[in-house]
Amino acid sequence: NAARIGWIIGDDSAAQRRIDHALTVAGENNNPYDLAYADYMAAIHFVLLERFGEAVAFAEGSIRLSDEHAFPQFAAISRVASGRAQVGLGFVSEGATLIREGLGRMADNSVRVALTLYMTWLAEGLLRAELFTEALAAVRDALRANPQELFFRPESLRLCGEILARMGA
């Protein structure tokens, strides 16, 4: 999370140092939970930097550990991160499927953290697939999902406007 704050304030080098530190500590601990969490956070970091290949690699590591050790939250949200990275790499259908799977797993486990962000990523994938009506529904769902979660709301609103513009509305 400290890396995400570094990214938000525009200090990419601090964000990268924080990710590197988390990965180092998790590796030294050799604890599967710490490793799954650090890999997930690295995946998110690289998605935000649009370094999608690296994001996929870290998300897949977190998914593997989470499935193997039954960490349902990381199993769910790492699928979302991997899906968003896949969309960024041009594998829009596969990415949207992974995001939906992750969101479904989140719902199954009553996980709501960052739901606005993840639902916005689904809308973005649907927009790239030119599924405008579905994208609009997804971004509107994102805006309603958790009104107190303001971190990604500006991007959700921007994307809603882009979708409406592409629909000619």
Image (cartoon, helix red, strand yellow):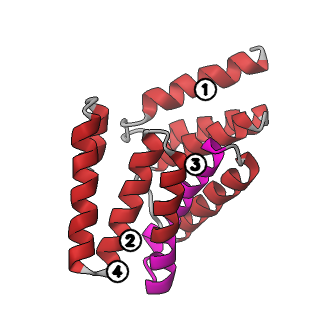
Real-space CA distance between mark 2 and mark 4, rounded to the nearest whole angstrom: 6 Å
Question: Would you name the residue on which mark 4 appears?
Answer: 32
Query: From which residue to which does the magenta span run?
Result: 63-89
Work out whether mark 2 precedes mark 1 in sequence or the reverse, and give the earlier one. Answer: 2
Q: Residue at x 77, y 14 (%)?
A: 168
Residue 130 colored in magenta in the image: no
Residue under numbered circle 1: 160
Q: Which residue is mark 2?
A: 36
Q: Looking at the figure, which quarter contains the C terminus?
A: top right
Give the residue drawn at x 58%, y 48%.
Answer: 84
Report helix, strand or loop for mark 1.
Answer: helix
Q: Going from the N terminus, do you reach mark 1 or mark 4 first?
A: 4
At which x and y percent is residue 71?
A: 43, 77
Q: Earlier in the sequence, mark 1 or mark 3?
A: 3
| Magenta stretch contains residue 70 | yes
Marks 2, 1: nearer the viewer: 2
Q: Which mark is residue 84?
A: 3
Whether pointer 2 and pointer 4 mark residues with C-beta atoms closer than 8 Å, the reply is yes
Closer to the camera, 102 or 60?
A: 60
Question: Which amino acid does the dot numbered 4 rest on?
Answer: Pro
Query: What is the number of callouts on the image?
Result: 4
